[in-house]
Amino acid sequence: MSRTTHLPALDGLRALAIALVLARHALRPFDAAPLVTLGGYDPFSVFLNGWLGVDLFFALSGYLVGRRILLDHAAGRFSWAEYARGRLHRIAPAYLCVVALAIAFFAVGGLRDGASLFASLASHLLFMQDITGSDLVTPLWSLGVEAKFYLAAPLLIALALRGGGKWLVALALMPLFARAALWANADHALTYEAFFATFRSPIYACWDGLALGVLAAWLLHRPAAAIDARAPRAAFWVGASVFAVLLLAPPWFAAIDWFDALFVQTFAGLGAALMVFGAAAGAGPQRLLGAAPLRWLARHAYALYLTHWAAIAPALLIARATGGDGVALWLAFTPIYLGLSFASAIVLHRFVEAPFLKTRAPHTVATAHA
């Protein structure tokens, strides 16, 4: 398994992940009540459940970072310094650019006082916003999770190499037990905001997909004879089925109960990791997942994730000038929101993200742009 081998199918999953996030936030201004109901079912549920895109991103990160570390260990060339440099070059430039722009926006607009902005800046520079709250650009909470995972990943791999995959299975179950402990001490009449701050955002409650992604990398890193040839195909389609059920269900977090708080993220992480495992092993619709438009979308996925949130407010302001309401307003809003998101993402990728990616050592160029 070559260190620089590119797996186009993972680009397709990365494109799916960002498409789900964009869809979820396309309904952000409209999710107080269903736009349309058909026989009591909200057909926009598939968009509202697009939070699953983050779990798919987590599984991809777990797999890709885990695979990279495993291959470096196998080649006897793992270096903490080189690993940290590669991670910083991958996420920091574009991330810091967006944080700086957000700080400037709030400061120039007089929307936040200096002490509050300094506290937010410190939290984001330390990647603690998954715990303290991402009050600059909401989706940046997941970057706090990812950054801590990057620190832990080499240690997780070391445990797996010494003690086997059972350590990774145990680590993947830890967030479930953390959420159970949190539920036992929580107000069970949870609002979405309280659920998000307690059960969704902090790394200790949401790293299911990351750990399962590392487990997928560890399983595929073993000799090919250790994996039944039918397993990747079964894994991909079981994972895709789990994802489909979660997407098509009524909006999960409209009314939060014990199952939502404890188990939905477990199933989301498992479904995502199974798809990643299968696709990385050559199963699933490889030609479709590796199609050129999806590869392009995957290449811009990180920049889109960082910038799309800022497009919501101006897009809504412009759309409201049309005088529409309900579905008509959403139809006016969505193309403006997507247009602004893609325009800003292309600029960020071209002038900030891509130049730093080129500075990484050749053997750190990642599958699916991890």
Image (tube, grey):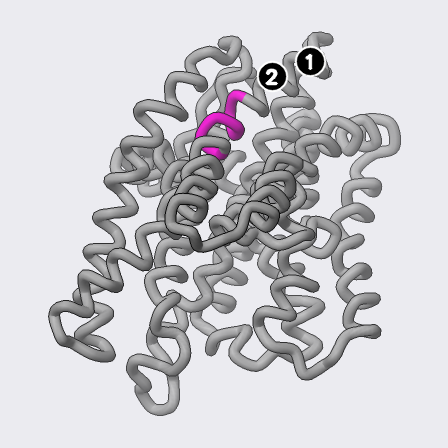
Q: Residue furthest right?
A: 163
Circle 2: element type: helix
Q: Amino acid at mark 1?
A: Ala
Q: Can residue 65 be seen from the camera position used here?
A: yes
Q: 169 or 28, which lies in front?
A: 28
Position above or below: 86 against 324: above
Circle 1: element type: helix
Instruction: Give, as a single range, the part of the protein colored magenta.
Output: 89-95
Q: Which residue is mark 1?
A: 81
**Residue at x 24%, y 69% (from the top left corner):** 330
Marks 1,2: beta carbons within 8 A:
yes
> How many C-alpha atoms fall within 10 Å of the one at disc 1: few (<14), some, or many (≥20)?
few
Q: Amino acid at mark 2?
A: Arg
**Residue 156 image offset from top left, x and y in percent:** 78, 33
Q: Is residue 327 magenta?
A: no
Q: 271 or 286, which lies in front?
A: 271
**Residue 220 image offset from top left, x and y in percent:** 64, 32
Q: Describe residue 105's horizontal placement relative to residue 197 as left or right.
A: left
- The image quadrant where one finds the N terminus is top right
Q: Can residue 62 be seen from the camera position used here?
A: no
**Residue 308 image offset from top left, x and y in percent:** 36, 48
